[in-house]
Image: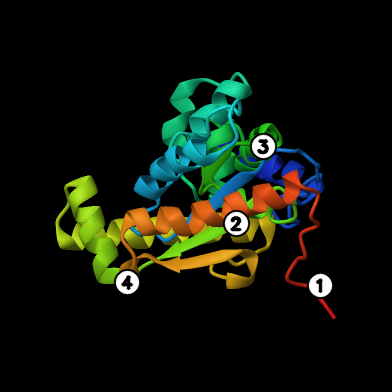
């Protein structure tokens, strides 16, 4: 009874505050010199391999003296916890998903972790800091939502057929077919909910991305070249002062 009353009071308190989960999180724009890449992948589309190889490709062709390209995908939330001095044990409580509000309140009351919207805000700060530093490749965790309006970020979407994705996940996670399918559905739905809740965007909206690649039709090395060459062209344009024309603008 006491717990029920406590939860009721806590929910009433949260409902009296600004509706953080109902409003898209605001992202302050910056004008950094170095570029960044944000990859939004369907689960099993090959993003992990592509990101690592892309970092090597860009570093090899970037001007001498530039810092190496870094990759943050699965380790992005660990970076968030480190930046904001939060205990590493919280990592297991932070899937890329929009948590049920009641579960979130109960977990906060029990001291398991901060509210999800607090963690989301802190992840935005970390992502923006990484983007401002540049020469970084970000995967998942709403990075494309955070960086969608930043001029130095090249947004990429990787997709693939379900059967190809199942085969990749079976190999990578050592799962049977049914388990791999469930893994993909859980991961993709969680990612979509996360982006929808905190950024009011549809992760599958192709207009969010500068490049959408079906990895069924390309080897990893070809995907790396497609993305890498686009980024290098963007870098050269910025270096020589050529203004980038966005899709919503007209050349006429």
**Between discs 3 and 1, the one toward the N terminus:** 3
**Between discs 3 and 4, the one toward the N terminus:** 3
**Between discs 2 and 4, the one toward the N terminus:** 2
Per the model, the C-alpha gap separating discs 2 and 1 is 17 Å
Tags 3 and 2 in contact by the CB under 8 Å rule?
no
Q: Nearer the viewer, mark 2 or mark 4?
A: 2
Residue at the outermost left position: 176
Report the residue marked by disc 1.
Answer: 249
Q: Nearer the viewer, mark 3 or mark 4?
A: 4
Tags 2 and 1 in contact by the CB under 8 Å rule?
no
Per the model, the C-alpha gap separating discs 3 and 2 is 25 Å
Which mark, by number, is residue 155? 2
Q: Residue at x 33, y 55 (%)?
A: 220
On the image, the x and y values in percent for residue 157 come to 51, 62
Per the model, the C-alpha gap separating discs 3 and 1 is 35 Å
Q: Residue at x 72, y 57 (%)?
A: 22
Report the residue marked by disc 4.
Answer: 161
Relative side of 68 to 171, left or right: right
Per the model, the C-alpha gap separating discs 1 and 4 is 33 Å
Secondary structure of the residue carrying tag 1 is loop
Q: Is residue 101 visible?
A: no
**Between discs 2 and 1, the one toward the N terminus:** 2
Q: Nearer the viewer, mark 2 or mark 1?
A: 1
Q: For this rendering, which residue is in front, 91 or 137? A: 137
Secondary structure of the residue carrying tag 3 is helix
Relative side of 122 to 93, left or right: right
Categorize mark 1 by other alpha carbons within 10 Å: few (<14), some (14-19), many (20+). few
Q: Residue at x 70, y 40 (%)?
A: 9
Q: Nearer the viewer, mark 3 or mark 1?
A: 1
Q: For this rendering, which residue is in front, 132 or 230? A: 230
Q: Quadrant of residue 194?
A: bottom right
């Amino acid at each position: 009874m006491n717990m029920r009353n406590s939860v009721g009071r806590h929910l009433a308190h949260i409902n009296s505050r600004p509706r953080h989960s109902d409003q898209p999180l605001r992202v302050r724009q910056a004008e950094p010199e170095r570029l960044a890449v944000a990859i939004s992948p369907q689960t099993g589309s090959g993003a992990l391999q592509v990101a690592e190889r892309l970092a090597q490709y860009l570093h090899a062709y970037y001007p001498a003296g530039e810092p190496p390209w870094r990759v943050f995908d699965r380790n992005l939330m660990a970076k968030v916890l480190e930046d904001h001095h939060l205990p590493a044990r919280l990592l297991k409580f932070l899937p890329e998903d929009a948590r049920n509000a009641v579960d979130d309140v109960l977990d906060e009351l029990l001291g398991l972790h901060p509210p999800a919207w607090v963690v989301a805000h802190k992840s935005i700060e970390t992502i923006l800091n990484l983007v401002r530093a540049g020469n970084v490749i970000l995967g998942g965790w709403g990075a494309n939502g955070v960086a969608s309006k930043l001029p130095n970020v090249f947004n990429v979407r990787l997709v693939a057929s379900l059967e190809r994705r199942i085969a990749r996940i079976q190999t990578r996670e050592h799962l049977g077919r049914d388990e791999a399918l469930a893994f993909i559905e859980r991961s993709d739905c969680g990612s979509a909910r996360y982006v929808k809740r905190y950024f009011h965007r549809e992760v599958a909206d192709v207009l969010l991305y500068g490049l959408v690649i079906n990895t069924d039709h390309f080897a990893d090395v070809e995907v790396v070249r497609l993305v890498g060459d686009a980024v290098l062209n963007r870098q050269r344009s910025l270096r020589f002062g050529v203004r980038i024309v966005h899709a919503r603008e007209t050349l006429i």
